[in-house]
Image: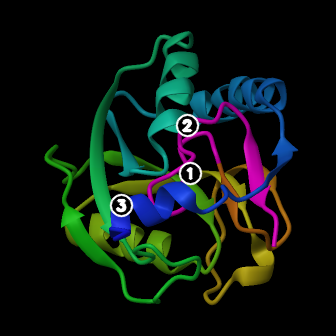
């Protein structure tokens, strides 16, 4: 029998995912984050979600921010530094740049995880280069033990230990984004 790469993945047992942050905990923290962020946003702020990992977080946070009757614009960037690995390569690439004009405007960058700090440092510098007036950052998860730069986010959902996490938009090799909670892959 010939086993193709596609069939090989189907026969391997799925990794065990250990819950770390529940759906209810995420929901409560997103509501609290929106209340913390809303007073700091100026009319016309451009919210830039870093894809793909932050798409679920961005959607939920934007819905909560809308309850504060803010004038905000949404855009996306696709940056990569992981590929299919569990460790950052340290080199950040722009796969898709934001399309909204950010010159002389405030920007709120949303990301799923702040670990090495390389991606958000790059994104902030890129927004500065594009002429953003003020740049705020918000991350769902912060892993300070992995930091390679002195970067600190303005708003943090949860601080977590150095575990490889999945769920709530966060993937491993494009899998597990659909989980409504955040879990870590058991070694």
| Badge nearest the viewer, 1 or 3 | 3
| In contact (CB < 8 Å): disc 1 and disc 2 | no
For residue 160, which quarter of the picture?
bottom right
As drawn, 2 above or below 51: below
For residue 171, which quarter of the picture?
bottom right
Residue found at x 56% / y 29%: 61
Does the magenta portion include 114? no
| In contact (CB < 8 Å): disc 1 and disc 3 | no
Residue found at x 21% / y 66%: 95
Q: Tag 3's secondary structure? A: helix
Magenta residues span: 167-187
Alpha-carbon span between mark 3 and mark 2: 30 Å
Q: Residues within 10 Å of mark 3 (few under 14, many from 20)?
A: few
Residue found at x 42% / y 33%: 42
User: Does 102 sit left or right of 5 as displayed?
Assistant: left
Disc nearer the start of the sequence (3/2): 3
In this view, the residue farthest toward the front is 1
| Badge nearest the viewer, 3 or 2 | 3
As drawn, 112 above or below 4: above
Colouring style: rainbow
* Residue placed under numbered mark 1 in the picture: 170
User: Does 171 sit left or right of 108 as displayed?
Assistant: right
* Residue placed under numbered mark 3 in the picture: 6
């Amino acid at each position: 029998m010939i086993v193709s790469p596609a069939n090989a993945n189907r026969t391997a047992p799925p990794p065990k995912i250990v819950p770390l942050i529940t759906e209810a905990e995420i929901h409560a923290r997103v509501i609290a984050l929106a209340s913390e962020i809303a007073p700091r946003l100026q009319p016309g702020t451009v919210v830039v979600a870093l894809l793909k990992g932050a798409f679920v977080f961005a959607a939920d946070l934007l819905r909560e921010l809308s309850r504060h009757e803010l004038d905000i614009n949404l855009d996306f960037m696709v940056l990569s530094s992981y590929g299919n690995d569990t460790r950052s390569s340290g080199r950040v690439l722009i796969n898709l740049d934001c399309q909204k004009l950010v010159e002389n405007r405030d920007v709120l960058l949303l990301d799923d995880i702040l670990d090495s700090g390389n991606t958000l440092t790059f994104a902030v510098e890129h927004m500065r280069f594009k002429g953003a007036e003020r740049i705020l950052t918000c991350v769902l998860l912060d892993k300070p033990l992995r930091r390679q730069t002195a970067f600190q986010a303005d708003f943090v959902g949860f601080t977590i230990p150095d575990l490889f996490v999945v769920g709530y938009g966060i993937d491993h090799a494009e899998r597990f984004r659909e989980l409504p909670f955040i879990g870590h892959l058991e070694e």
